[in-house]
Image: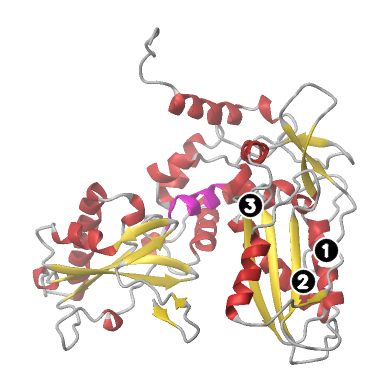
């Protein structure tokens, strides 16, 4: 922290080695202590490396290269691989999954500064990925399909069918994406636990070859377009958020705010066209959570409205433009609640930070705009927000250059609705899509049994106390 001229404090960052990996706070020193407890590691350092917009832990081990035989390069590499595998195996017994390094680098000595401290900036970049050896190439059609899915999810080029998914930087969230893509592309329902039990492409393909028919995704589970005005039950997560809203009306605890600063000309007619195209494209942006008054049920339902449109304009910024005032405005906007029974459960504001005479004139290169985007967590999450921003920028670029809607094929299919409207958008929240006749299929039984087992008490409760 440091004081600014106006007396306010500016946060500069952390001076300790605590980082955030996949939502978990990780102390790098704790991993280093666990590594140095291994007899063959004399010294080490753990750092964070960014790749493909994801953070990975990398362990640098000192004093291990002297243990290798220098007979040949192939033998040396084999010994290094064996040492790394041994280190992974031992460390997995000491630390949880999210604290496991995704890559290891063996060094004679760690680089140090003049003061004798580890020079983290001089550490070599680690190669996060697999080895595409000859025997590691797909040999069957199923392995080839799994190979392409893993490549897309892990976003890596080098990969072999014997490489461990989790040692390549995979984790439980990415494993969920793999099973989802397998369901859509291959028609198999692979339990998440099998990703941990069979973490290589070869093992996964062998398991599917043996059990695939038993776990084939039901062909009957097809999402059909709902009738206009028809309500559907709220998901379990939506019910929970709706109940919390009833207990604490007007709460802003479950809002997802975002603030973006846009410098340069902003075509507001194009912005309106883009936003309304997204609202038409995603049912969740036209969804409200309502209670059915026609019966005695307390459970809420999702009501999707057909005609929801926004008319957005650049607004004059109220007051003086300075960092403190802008931050206060952002905080105030993020604190405004939604009426869950009214769609859309999303709002956007475009505030002109410049002093242009015509707020909606796109010809000025001097335009400076603050975009405030707020969604309720009942229809959105972090994944959804990234989808919205990605599609917003893609559509804006297309519409400004008079190109066709690049997502047009998803819109208004009158017979079959693909996984991607209300359920696809909030997939990380919903987990299980609301499908006609879904409760008839064994997949529901598997999920429900899992929950019953995990929640069952270990012994009977004592009575009379």
| Place of residue 368 in the rendered image (x, y in percent of width and height, measured from the top left) | 71, 84
Res. 50 image quadrant: bottom left
- Label 2 to label 3: alpha-carbon separation: 30 Å
Res. 42 image quadrant: bottom left
Tag 1–tag 2 contact (CB < 8 Å): yes
- Label 1 to label 3: alpha-carbon separation: 27 Å
Residue at 49% x, 54% y: name it: 174
Asked if residue 186 can be seen in this view, the reply is: no
The stretch of residues the image draws in magenta is 170-179
| 204 vs 154: above or below | above
**Would you name the residue on which mark 2 appears?**
395
Decide: few, some or many residues near mark 1? Use Cα within 10 Å; few <14, some 14-19, many ≥20.
some
**358 and 56: which one is in front?**
358
Task: Judge from the rendering whether residue 59 lies leftward or rightward of residue 234; answer left or right.
Answer: left
Res. 356 image quadrant: bottom right
**Would you name the residue on which mark 3 appears?**
252
**211 and 392: which one is in front?**
392
| Place of residue 83 in the rendered image (x, y in percent of width and height, measured from the top left) | 19, 61
| 102 vs 422: above or below | below
Label 1 sits on a secondary structure element that is: helix
Task: Judge from the rendering whether residue 53 lies leftward or rightward of residue 337; answer left or right.
Answer: left
| Place of residue 81 in the rendered image (x, y in percent of width and height, measured from the top left) | 23, 63
Point out the image quarter for the C terminus.
top left
| Place of residue 403 in the rendered image (x, y in percent of width and height, measured from the top left) | 83, 77
Disc on res. 277: 1
């Amino acid at each position: 922290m440091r004081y600014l001229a106006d007396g306010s404090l500016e946060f500069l960052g952390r001076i300790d080695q605590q980082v955030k990996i996949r939502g978990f706070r990780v102390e790098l020193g704790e991993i280093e202590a666990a590594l140095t407890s291994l007899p063959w590691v004399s010294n080490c350092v753990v750092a964070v490396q960014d790749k493909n917009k994801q953070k990975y832990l990398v362990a640098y081990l000192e004093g291990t290269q002297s243990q290798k035989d220098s007979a040949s390069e192939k033998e040396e590499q084999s010994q290094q691989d064996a040492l790394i595998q041994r280190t992974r195996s031992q460390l997995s017994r000491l630390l949880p999954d999210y604290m496991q390094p995704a890559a290891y680098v063996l060094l004679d000595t760690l680089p140090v500064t003049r003061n004798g401290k580890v020079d983290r900036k001089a550490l070599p970049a680690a190669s996060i990925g697999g080895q595409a050896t000859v025997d590691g190439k797909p040999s069957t059609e199923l392995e080839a399909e799994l190979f392409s899915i893993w490549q897309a999810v892990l976003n890596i080029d080098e990969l072999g069918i014997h490489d461990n998914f989790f040692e390549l930087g995979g984790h439980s969230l990415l494993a969920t994406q793999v099973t989802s893509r397998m369901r859509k592309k291959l028609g198999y329902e692979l339990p998440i636990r099998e990703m941990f039990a069979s973490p290589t492409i070869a093992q996964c393909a062998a398991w599917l070859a043996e059990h695939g028919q038993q776990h084939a995704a039901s062909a009957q589970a097809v999402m059909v377009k709902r009738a206009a005005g028809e309500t559907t039950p709220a998901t379990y997560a939506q019910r929970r958020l709706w109940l919390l809203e009833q207990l604490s009306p007007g709460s802003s605890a479950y809002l997802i705010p975002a603030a973006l600063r846009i410098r340069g000309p902003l075509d507001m007619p194009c912005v309106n066209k883009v936003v309304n195209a997204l609202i038409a494209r995603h049912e969740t942006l036209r969804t409200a959570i309502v209670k059915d008054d026609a019966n005695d049920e307390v459970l809420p339902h999702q009501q999707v409205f057909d005609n929801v449109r926004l008319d957005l304009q650049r607004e004059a910024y109220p007051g003086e433009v300075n960092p403190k005032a802008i931050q206060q405005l952002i905080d105030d906007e993020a604190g405004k609640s939604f009426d869950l029974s009214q769609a859309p459960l999303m709002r956007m504001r475009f505030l002109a930070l410049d002093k242009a005479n015509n707020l909606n004139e796109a010809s000025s290169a001097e335009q400076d705009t603050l975009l405030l985007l707020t969604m309720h967590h009942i229809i959105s999450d972090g994944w959804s927000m990234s989808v919205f921003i990605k599609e917003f920028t893609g559509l804006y670029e297309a519409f400004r250059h008079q190109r066709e809607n690049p997502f047009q094929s998803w819109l208004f299919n009158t017979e079959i609705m693909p996984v991607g409207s209300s359920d696809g958008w909030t997939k990380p929240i919903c987990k299980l899509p609301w499908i006609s006749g879904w409760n008839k299929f064994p997949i529901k039984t598997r999920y429900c049994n899992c929950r019953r087992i995990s929640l069952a008490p270990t012994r009977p409760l004592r009575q009379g106390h």
